[in-house]
Image (spheres, helix red, strand yellow):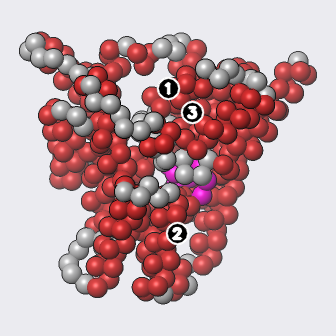
Amino acid sequence: MLWDLFCTFLRIGFVSFGGGYAMIPIIDFEVTRHGWMTTKEFTEIIAVAGMSPGPIATNSAIIVGYKTAGMNGAVISALGMTLPTLFIILLVSSVFFRYHQTKLVKSAFYGLRPIITGLIIYAAIRFALSNHVIGSFSWHTLGLLSICGLSLLALIKYRIHPIAVILVSGLAGVVLWG
Amino acid sequence: MNKKWNLILQIFFVFLKIGPITFGGGYAMIPVIEREIVIKKRWIRPQDVADVLVIAQSVPGAIALNSATFIGYTIAGVQGAVAALIGVLLPTFLIVIGLSLLFLYLHGNPIVDAALQGMSAAIVALIIFAAYKIGRTAVFDKTTFITAFATAAVLFFLNLNPVLVICLGIATGIIQIKVKELLGMTVLLEKNEAGQVQKEPVGKSVNQ
């Protein structure tokens, strides 16, 4: 189990281009595939990870590790996520510091960026479905959809800080269903 | 030797202090890094901060961890990198564990569950927001537009491993550019090159 957690997050750590919420679909794929938790349970983890300081993806990995294998799981998952960081930074800063200027790397990013965009669009649909933000009509779904829509408006138009958005939405949940 | 370990210990404590400030993502760290490491400690020069950002953004991994590791390495080599990484990660690690313990303990409480439901709707919004932000720089011509939506569609119907998809993405970009060149098309590798000026500075627009 610990070895499985370590390998999974090590693999994720190496490909976590984009950072932040861009890595959520990858972690979601792995935790549901291993049967560690459902997408709905994972959404709650992201909520807690998003409220804490530090990188969202690393935070989520720590909580997934903690819930599946206790404190050892948390440490192992954090290690798995951060070892690639250490390795890549050491490589980049010692071997090819200016590598980002080369045309080959720019071409790679030309394909990589839209694919990550697609990956996150897919994640948005998946999370919306498993949290009933999209679904057959009910007052509950309508409430969730409104919170989602208003949050989006707050983020894009009014540039409200993500943590404020999470906290206010929690409050809205309490008002609506508490 | 003692002097070196003293420096490494200092690096650890400076990043231990910076760690909890990285609320809402790595970019929040940059002004703090400038104050603590450039102005107070004078470990790196002001013009090096730009290099830190470029490296932190273009390699995989969280911005906060990447910048800390890179700065640590610049100051004191591999040990410096490890000290900075552990320093920046330790406080958030403990806070995250504490918060999830609190939520585990409160789980089943109707008010907390209602709050979590509201928050889950906000998380969906945050994921859409992430797609929007990346999409604004990533999608700027027909090829990138088709690539983005084809990826979403393929994932939706085939449930492919995202790690594989990202590796394919790297190959796709290189092939797309090669094909375009062979066809004699004008190639714009990035949005900036298309003459479109980015509306806001990086530190302001991205807060993830």
Protein chain holding label 3: B
Q: Which residues are magenta?
A: A52-61
Q: Which amino acid lies under the numbered mark 2 shown in the image of this protein?
A: Leu
**Disc 1: which residue:** B54
Q: Position of residue B201 (x, y in %)?
A: 45, 36
In screen coordinates, is A177 left or right of B142?
Answer: right
Instruction: Please report, as a chain letter, where disc 2 is located.
Output: A
Q: Residue furthest left?
A: B183
**What residue did someone put label 3 on?**
B66
Q: Is residue A49 above or below residue B36?
A: below
Instruction: Give the left or right position of residue A102, taking residue A55 as reference.
Output: left
Question: What amino acid is found at the position of numbered circle 3 in the picture?
Answer: Asn
Q: Is residue B147 above or below residue A43?
A: above
Circles 1, 3 touching at the beta carbon (< 8 Å): no
Chain letter of the residue beneath label 1 in the structure image = B
Q: CA distance from mark 1 to mark 3?
A: 10 Å
Bin the neighbour count of mark 1 within 10 Å (Cα to Cα): few under 14, some 14-19, many 20 and up.
some
Q: Main secondary structure of the magenta part?
A: helix
Q: Position of residue B79 (x, y in %)?
A: 73, 25
Residue closest to the eye, B157 or A126: A126
Which residue is depicted at the point 20% across and 78% down?
A136
Tell me which residue sits at (32%, 14%) in the image. Answer: A103
Note whether residue A91 is visible.
no
Residue annotated with mark 2: A167
Instruction: Using the rendered image, report if marks 1 and 3 lie on a common chain.
Output: yes
| Residue depicted at 52% across the width and 51% down the height | A56
